[in-house]
Amino acid sequence: MESKKKKFLYSIFTIILVLTIFFSVLYYLYWPTLIATIFSSEGLWIGVVLIICRTLILGIMSFFLYRKWLRQEAIYISDAYFLFGSFFGILTCAKVYDLFYNLVIISGVFNPEFVLLLVKIRFFIIIVNLLPVLYIGLDAILIYINMNKNKEMDKKQFSKLRLRIMFGFALVTALVIVLAPTLNFLNLVFPFITILIYIAIAFMFLFMYKNKRLTQANGLIIGIAFICFIVSNLLRTILININLSYSIFAELIDIGINLFMFIGFISKPKYA
């Protein structure tokens, strides 16, 4: 088991190193434009600072969950702590990318094809980010099936069903992203898809909480947090359309939601 833990640590350090190099090169290549954009827009630097703070908070939460996972006697990548840690870990990378992406969009100096590529990458990251919590949330399907059928579905059957659902979800959303012809099309269709997924995940965790099936985390808090994410995304769109500087408030709200979700990830329900 110790060798397995060491292997994981080496893997995660390698991933962190590769991502650090990648983002360092990315920011280095466009640094003059990014800096000029920050100082050319009044108050934009506050938003940048908030995104950096949120990134650090997410990274700390991811580290805490991974450490909690590693301290268990037996570790599996299907374990809730690993999946929750992965969710925050991917979200940490997403925020580093988002900072670059947002500054590029605000600068307005890049051609539409490049911007469309960046948007597609951003939506790919969103999909990957949702997979860990979707994996856990799909347990609700097993609970529902077993509650409404005389014969229970065994874990092997359910594992196959879960993988099919996740593969189908990833494939359909990937096709939408890849085949999206314009930025407007992607911005119109994809948020609708992600909102539906947020609703589904929220329902899954609330369902598991109601039926007292999730013991490693508080499904009620997690479900409410995902509902809050939906409201936050809608609010962010409204605020940005009113005034770009208002996105600062949206970032603060998201930090609060992330912290609330983290509490759900690390706290056990009363029935556990």
Image: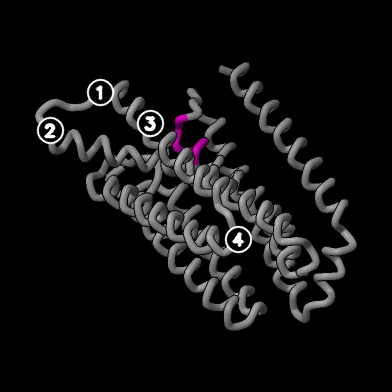
Amino acid type, mark 2: Lys
Task: Name the N-terminal-most of marks 4 and 2.
Answer: 2
Q: Is residue 36 above or below residue 208?
A: below
Q: Quadrant of the N terminus?
A: top right
* Label 3 SS: helix
In the displayed structure, does residue 228 sit left or right of residue 129?
Answer: left
Amino acid type, mark 3: Arg
* Label 4 SS: helix
Is the stretch drawn in magenta largely helix, strand or loop?
A: helix
- Residue at mark 1: 154
Residue 45 pos. (x, y %):
77, 72
Front tag of 3 and 2: 3
**Which quarter of the figure has residue 53?**
bottom right
Magenta segment range?
78-83
Whole-number angstrom distance, CA of label 1 to CA of label 2? 12 Å
Q: Which residue corresponds to the image point at 45% horizontal and 37% vertical from the top-left?
A: 80
Residue 82 drawn in magenta: yes
Whole-number angstrom distance, CA of label 4 to CA of label 2? 45 Å
Q: Mark 2, residues whose alpha carbon is within 10 Å: few (<14), some, or many (≥20)?
A: few
Front tag of 4 and 3: 4
Residue 114 pos. (x, y %):
73, 55
Q: Is residue 12 above or below residue 260?
A: above
The disc placed on residue 149 is: 2
Q: Which residue corresponds to the image point at 73% horizontal and 70% vertical from the top-left?
A: 106
Whole-number angstrom distance, CA of label 4 to CA of label 3? 29 Å
- Residue at mark 3: 164
Whole-number angstrom distance, CA of label 1 to CA of label 3? 16 Å
- Residue at mark 4: 183
Whole-number angstrom distance, CA of label 1 to CA of label 4? 44 Å
Q: Is residue 1 above or below residue 245?
A: above
Amino acid type, mark 4: Leu
Residue 35 pos. (x, y %):
86, 66
